[in-house]
Image: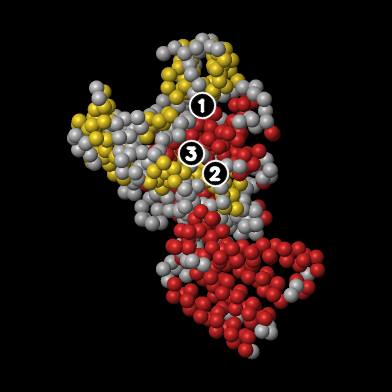
């Protein structure tokens, strides 16, 4: 290993000379304590290094040693249920070693070297394998079968495979490629800044069903898609991501707490281990990986944390799983970029952010996708990315939000005014959008209902019409509206309060299947159509609005899943009561 010497320390930035052997993004050991750092700029034999630990007390003259390897994560059994810091050090192990605070220079492997795993082979001696083929499985948790794959760049003939109880470092398979023999263990290493390879990328034509009505009905995200949740403080970004983690039909969840407040991240770390997976009744952590890098932890590790998280997510995608990654929040990650850029004395862009902010954000989000993995079985997997953005003061014109919106296809704009009115999820239906609607409409027509896209479009038109009518109401009062327009206002109110408003803490209302969503929205539109016809025939608006069935429509969200007869009964009463009001 080649050694250099520190000549400058500026917070998390360390400059060293004598580093002619170093390369961009090499991991280095800095100072007497051997702090972990990464080369981010090279000028001749002088290297600028971002250090992932506190540099207090470090001074010029101390040694810097390059490892010659890029920042990488360990991928193998033991990832599930783990809670890591930004550079994949397990926080529970560090706590046992150094107490409640992370000691500087502590080095802990990402995967437990002592844990034993039951390896079941899936190939035989003499079989030809290629990169991505599954050579065996490990039942990592009750919910996750960990598929041990041939690493990228390896192929050949299996000359040895054994059923064994092995650690992640023990050889379980040998593959001969010509004169070369590859020893395969349960573990791989992969550089975090390099996307894992795949055979083919597919179109985003399947929805990621979340059970959240405002998302699934109006602004859906596709499997392998990207979404952004910007919103001011207190508008519910974290709760939305928790709901997605719990209910989205993804098989693996990777939650990256990137620069969020320590107390808020503590709530996540305390809550997640006690959550149940609603589909199986098992602990949600059995299919979850947490990466925690709070605002009081070293700033440079924020950047690494999002790359560590998405590399782990890609690994499970390659196994053939549907994976969802939650990043909370990318604003803190961008602030880390800004701080390091400032210390490097680079030319600042808008609001001090580096000029390459947009390209770095694109590098991250573009690693999402629905793919055919490497391997002869051509299994499919997906990686969906949902990033929270915390614009200062809720200003959506600031650079991080704008750079993100240029990349992602779904925008769930949170509104503090809705949050103040206790309307959750506080997603503003007039500002939000999804660019996946046209791609997934075919699937929705086939699996939800042929009329579902039209129902959704009509409900959105009613909400937009309400916004226009509210301007008139504010100027001259509701009495100036026609009876039809007043009916539109009442229907819009029903869509907002009876359909879009959803209680995350109610046992029934917390999740709504697509079939139930269609029936709920169908009741609201059924009443709107029949009441409109009755008004055209001279019925009294006040009598229509006083019908008891309107309360039943409002309570329809409490009908349990799998009971369509409850909705059919309400639909029948809509027909009967509106007809009676028309006749009277």
Q: Position of residue 322 (x, y in %)?
A: 41, 47
Please state, as top left, top right, bottom left or bottom right, where the C terminus lies in the image. Answer: bottom right
**Residue at the image point whose x is 46% and y is 15% from the top:** 65
Secondary structure of the residue carrying tag 2 is strand
Residue annotated with mark 3: 367
Q: Position of residue 227 (x, y in %)?
A: 54, 47
Whether the residues at callouts 2 and 1 have beta carbons within 8 Å, the answer is no
Q: Nearer the viewer, residue 396 or 61?
A: 396
Is residue 15 at least partly visible in the picture? yes
Q: Position of residue 386 (x, y in %)?
A: 52, 46
**Residue at the image point whose x is 56% and y is 58% from the top:** 218
Whether the residues at callouts 3 and 2 have beta carbons within 8 Å, the answer is no
Sequence-first tag of 2 and 1: 1
Secondary structure of the residue carrying tag 1 is loop
Cα–Cα gap, marks 2 and 1? 23 Å
Please state, as top left, top right, bottom left or bottom right, where the N terminus lies in the image. Answer: top left
Sequence-first tag of 3 and 2: 3
Q: Quadrant of residue 57?
A: top right
Q: How is the image coloured?
A: secondary structure
Cα–Cα gap, marks 1 and 3? 24 Å
Cα–Cα gap, marks 3 and 2? 13 Å
Residue annotated with mark 2: 387
Is residue 264 at least partly visible in the picture? no
């Amino acid at each position: 290993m080649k050694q250099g010497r520190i000549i400058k320390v500026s917070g998390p930035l360390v400059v060293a000379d004598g580093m002619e052997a170093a390369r961009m993004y090499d991991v280095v050991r800095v100072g007497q304590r051997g702090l972990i750092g990464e080369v981010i700029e090279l000028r001749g034999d002088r290297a600028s290094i971002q250090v992932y630990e506190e540099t207090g007390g470090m001074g010029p003259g101390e040694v810097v040693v390059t490892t010659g390897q890029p920042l990488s994560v360990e991928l193998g059994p033991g990832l599930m249920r783990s809670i890591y810091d930004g550079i994949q050090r397990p926080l529970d192990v560090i706590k046992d070693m150094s107490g409640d605070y992370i000691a500087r220079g502590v080095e802990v492997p990402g995967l437990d070297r002592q844990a034993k795993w039951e390896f079941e082979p899936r190939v035989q001696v003499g079989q030809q394998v290629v990169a991505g083929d599954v050579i065996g499985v490990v039942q990592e948790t009750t919910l996750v079968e960990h598929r041990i794959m041939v690493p990228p760049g390896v192929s050949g003939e299996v000359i040895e495979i054994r059923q064994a109880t092995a650690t992640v470092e023990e050889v379980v398979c040998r593959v001969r490629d010509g004169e070369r023999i590859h020893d395969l263990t349960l573990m791989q290493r992969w550089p975090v800044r390099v996307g894992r390879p795949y055979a083919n990328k597919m179109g985003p034509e399947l929805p990621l069903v979340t059970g959240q009505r405002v998302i699934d009905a109006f602004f859906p995200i596709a499997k392998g898609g990207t979404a952004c949740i910007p919103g001011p403080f207190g508008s519910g970004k974290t709760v939305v991501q928790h709901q997605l983690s719990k209910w989205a039909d993804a098989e693996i969840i990777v939650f990256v707490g990137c620069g969020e407040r320590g107390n808020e991240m503590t709530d996540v770390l305390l809550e997640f281990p006690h959550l149940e997976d609603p589909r199986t009744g098992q602990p949600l952590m059995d299919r979850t990986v947490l990466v925690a890098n709070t605002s009081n932890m070293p700033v440079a590790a924020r950047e690494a944390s999002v790359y560590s998280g998405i590399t782990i997510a890609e690994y499970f995608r390659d196994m053939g799983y549907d994976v969802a990654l939650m990043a909370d929040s990318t604003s803190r990650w961008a602030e880390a970029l800004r701080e390091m850029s400032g210390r490097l004395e680079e030319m600042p862009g808008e609001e001090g952010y580096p000029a390459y902010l947009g390209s770095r954000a694109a590098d991250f989000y573009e690693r999402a996708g629905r793919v055919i993995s490497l391997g002869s079985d051509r299994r499919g997997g997906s990686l969906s990315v949902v990033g929270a953005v915390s614009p200062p003061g809720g200003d959506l014109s600031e650079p991080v939000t704008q750079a993100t919106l240029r990349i992602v296809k779904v925008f769930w704009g949170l509104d503090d005014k809705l949050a103040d009115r206790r309307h959750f999820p506080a997603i503003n239906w007039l500002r939000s959008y999804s660019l996946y609607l046209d791609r997934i409409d075919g699937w929705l027509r086939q699996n939800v209902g042929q009329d579902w896209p039209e129902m959704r479009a009509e409900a959105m038109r009613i909400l937009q019409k309400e916004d226009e009518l509210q301007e008139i109401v504010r100027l001259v009062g509701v009495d100036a509206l026609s009876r039809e327009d007043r009916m539109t206002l009442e229907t819009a109110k029903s869509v907002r309060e009876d359909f879009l408003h959803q209680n995350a803490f109610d046992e029934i209302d917390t999740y709504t299947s697509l079939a139930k969503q269609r029936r709920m929205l169908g009741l609201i539109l059924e009443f709107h159509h029949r009441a409109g016809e009755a008004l055209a025939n001279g019925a009294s608006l006040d009598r229509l609005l006083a019908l008891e069935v309107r309360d039943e429509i409002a309570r329809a969200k409490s009908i349990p899943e799998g009971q369509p007869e409850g909705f059919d009964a309400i639909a029948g009463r809509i027909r009967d009561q509106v007809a009676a009001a028309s006749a009277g």
